[in-house]
Image (cartoon, helix red, strand yellow):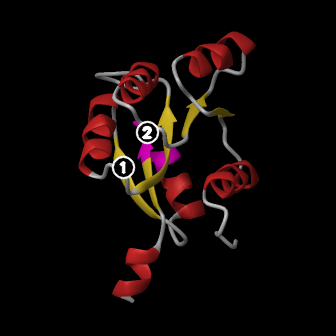
């Protein structure tokens, strides 16, 4: 079992809301290893600790301490090339544009559906079978 777990793709999740994180974990936690950060500063630390190992970052936009836009911008400035998927409850085109301008690869609008989350993760971890 230990070997199986080490072979699972690593997903970093920045999410300050427990219920949103529990949904993400329930949907992809059996297929992926998940590390959870509750704010932008924590996701920067997790990324730096696991540099080169994570397949994708799921980044909430509105978080305490440091928001997801700033964290995404800093990650890109530090040379991070992995996909960063912004998650936001704001569906306005300007919010999507702002996330993309700060370095997001794509944007998922909350509430996130199981189908949307699986589809998103599958784009960046194509070998996953749901």
Residue 28 falls in image quadrant:
bottom right
**Left or right of 61: which side holds 126?**
right
Image disc number at residue 15: 2
Task: Tell me residue 35's x, y (percent).
Answer: 36, 54
User: For the residue carrying disc 1, how many other residues have a C-alpha within 10 Å: few (<14), some (14-19), or many (20+)?
Assistant: some
Residue at the image position 69 percent from the left and 52 percent from the top: 123
Quadrant of the rendering where the N terminus is positioned: bottom left
- Distance of label 2 from label 1 (alpha carbons): 7 Å
> From the viewer's perspective, is residue 84 above or below residue 117?
above
**Left or right of 98: which side holds 75?**
left
Residue at the image position 40 percent from the left and 78 percent from the top: 5
**In the image, is residue 19 part of the stretch drawn in magenta?**
yes
Q: How many marks?
A: 2
**Left or right of 78: which side holds 11?**
right
Q: Which residues lie in the magenta part?
A: 13-21
Query: Observer-nearest residue: 46 or 90?
Result: 46
> From the viewer's perspective, is residue 2 above or below residue 62?
below
Q: Are marks 2 and 1 in contact (CB under 8 Å)?
A: yes
Task: Tell me residue 79's x, y (percent).
Answer: 39, 32
**In the image, is residue 113 part of the stretch drawn in magenta?**
no
Q: Secondary structure at mark 1?
A: strand
**Left or right of 129: which side holds 60?**
left
Residue at the image position 43 percent from the left and 39 percent from the top: 15
Quadrant of the rendering where the C terminus is positioned: bottom right
User: For the residue carrying disc 2, how many other residues have a C-alpha within 10 Å: few (<14), some (14-19), or many (20+)?
Assistant: many
Task: Tell me residue 68's x, y (percent).
Answer: 44, 26
Q: Secondary structure at mark 2?
A: loop
Q: Earlier in the sequence, mark 2 or mark 1?
A: 2
Task: Tell me residue 61's x, y (percent).
Answer: 50, 25
Residue carrying label 1: 36
């Amino acid at each position: 079992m230990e070997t199986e777990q080490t072979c699972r793709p690593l997903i970093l999740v920045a999410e300050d809301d427990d219920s949103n994180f529990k949904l993400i974990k329930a949907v992809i936690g059996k297929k992926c290893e998940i590390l959870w950060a509750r704010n932008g500063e924590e996701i920067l630390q997790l990324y730096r600790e696991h540099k080169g190992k994570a397949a994708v970052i799921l980044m909430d936009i509105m978080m305490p301490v440091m928001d997801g836009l700033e964290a995404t911008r800093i990650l890109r400035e530090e040379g991070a090339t992995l996909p960063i998927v912004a998650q936001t409850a704001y569906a306005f085109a300007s919010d999507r544009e702002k996330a993309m301008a700060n370095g997001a690869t794509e944007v998922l609008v909350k509430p996130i559906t199981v189908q949307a989350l699986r589809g998103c993760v599958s784009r960046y971890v194509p070998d996953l079978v749901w």
